[in-house]
Amino acid sequence: MNEKNLDDLSHRTDSNEKFDQLKQALEGVEKKYGDYFKERPSHVHGEEHDSLFDHCVINKDSVSGVIRFFFTDTELPQHIIDECHDAVKRVLPDATYIPPG
């Protein structure tokens, strides 16, 4: 397992705008690889097919303002993982990577 894939990305912000921008950027990655996800069964009961968001978590703590992004597994091809990390870096250039554990 490549531990870098599971790294936690953390960024403190008071703005929901950055969170929304990050979600949109990740949705763009999912759309770009739509055929890949549509060919895979969903991990979520009741969903038609797989989704990028079945493999990662993005959330914003309403108290601290910290946005977190991390992968929950390493099933995705490395190029999709890399594009997700690139999207995060574009939206949150001063984000901090926190190793898992």
Image: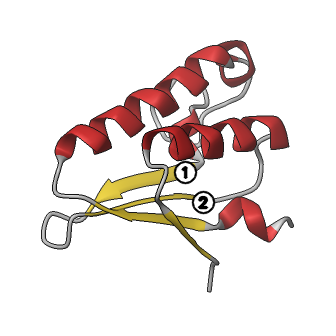
Amino acid at circle 1: Cys
Residue 30, compared with residue 5, is above or below; it is above
Q: Amino acid at mark 2?
A: Thr
Q: Work out which quarter of the rendered image holds the N terminus and state it.
A: bottom right
Q: In this rendering, is residue 29 above or below 84?
A: above
Residue at point 84%, 65% (across, down): 2
Count neighbours of disc 2 (C-alpha within 10 A) and say few if under 14, some if 14 to 19, many if 20 or more: some
Q: Residue furthest bottom?
A: 101
Report whether 55 appears left or right of 78.
left
**How far across and how far down the image is residue 73, in percent?**
68, 58
Earlier-in-chain disc, 1 versus 2: 1
Q: Nearer the viewer, residue 29 or 36?
A: 29
Query: Which residue, given by chain and number where applicable, does mark 2 sit on?
Result: 72
Q: Nearer the viewer, residue 51 or 41?
A: 51
At horizontal 54% and vertical 51% (from top left) the residue drawn is 56
- In the picture of the structure, the residue carrying the numbered disc 1 is 56
Tell me the element at label 2.
Answer: loop
